[in-house]
Amino acid sequence: MTSPVLTFFNNKGGVGKTSLIYHLAWMFASLCKKVVIADLDPQANLTAFFLDEERIEDIWEKSTDGSTIYQCVQPIAGVGDIKEPILQNVAAGLYLLPGDVRLSHYEDTLSDAWPHSMGDTNLYRPMRILSSFWQIMQMAANQVEADIILVDIGPNLGAINRSVLIAADYVVIPLSADLFSLQGLKNLGPALKGWKQLWKKRLDNWQSSMEAPGYPNFQLPAGKMEVIGYLCQQHSARLDRPVKAYDKWLHRIPNVYRDAVLEQPPDAEVKQENDPYCLATIKHYRSLVPMAQEGRKPVFLLTSADGALGSHAYAVQDAKKDFEQFAYKIAEKIGMEI
């Protein structure tokens, strides 16, 4: 059995992706699901959400095999093989595979393996490299019998993200209502389609090769990459960006999504608020965010001891309802019972 892999991705940054994964992971754990969080962004921002700097420094400095995603893949970039991951148990049912800024060094290894995986011979090693993220995440999930794997990646269309998306069963696209986010969406749809097709060719090439029978236990990801929807950040009033400008881009999201991702014709009637592909609208929690960061917990677990009093206490309850609804919607989309 393998655990489903859910990746949040837009090749435009600043759309609240990392914070979203952090809160969703905590919510799934509070709903009694076992969650593995894999930080596959070389910036390691999600790791910084879960662990303090002293703990991260200790993990990075010791460089123990398997202690970060980079330490898991680093041996296969040479003459070795991938290493079993060492998970950080953040809370009950919540396990982190820490990120590592050195992961960017693995980009060249993945780039080199991509063309070699379509050769006639010596296919095992390049296929092992290209599927290494999936292999490691499934190892991690097996350790704790995880119900789901949540993955954070950086905002680009490079070799690391290609291999991460190959490992993904499901994809959610976070958006903000602006030109840059929509342009990222336009780039993302064709990229996912292309990677999916190219990975299928590599799977077919491997399965028809003379080497495949010699590795009967070598599993590979299907490269499903099913986009289950998008979510949008709620407008936050700014003097330099009036509501009119926000609404302009917001109204364009549903049909850009249909065109770029689903390859469907536009629907003049659909709006973001009634679009079945819109999974959620994420609110801006403003002053709750620094409280949550200081307490190293999600906003919906803040208490009066953290300073969540009066209107803040009501906002905490609203956040809990919002993320609970979001978690249930995600679970429904991927067929996970809660």
Image (cartoon, rainbow, N blue to C red):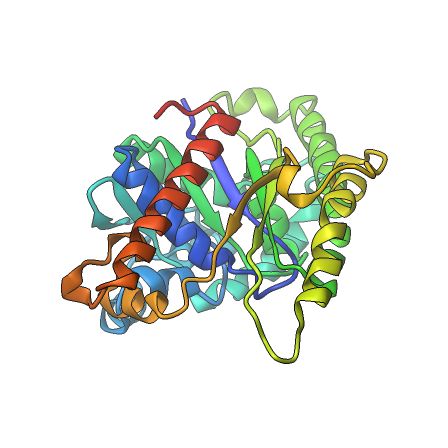
How many labels sit on residues?
A: 0
Asked which quadrant contains residue 117, the reply is: top right
From this viewpoint, is residue 200 visible?
Answer: yes
Q: Where is residue 219? Give x, y as percent.
A: 50, 27
Q: Nearer the viewer, residue 56 or 284?
A: 284
* Residue 136 percent coordinates (x, y): 42, 42
Q: Residue at x 26, y 68 (%)?
A: 52
Q: Is residue 235 above or below residue 148?
A: below
Q: Quadrant of the N terminus?
A: top left
Q: Tell me the residue at 81%/36% (across/down).
A: 267
Q: Residue furthest right?
A: 265
Rendering coords of residue 294 (x, y %)? 26, 70
On the picture, is 156 further left or further right than 135? right
x, y percentage for residue 12? 65, 62
Question: Can you say whether 297 is above or below 277 in the image?
Answer: below
Q: Is residue 301 left or right of residue 115?
A: left
Left or right of 83, for residue 64: left
Report if residue 85 is visible in the image.
no
Along the line of sight, the residue nearer the viewer: 64 or 27: 27
Q: Is residue 333 left or right of residue 25?
A: right
Quadrant of the frame with the C terminus: top left
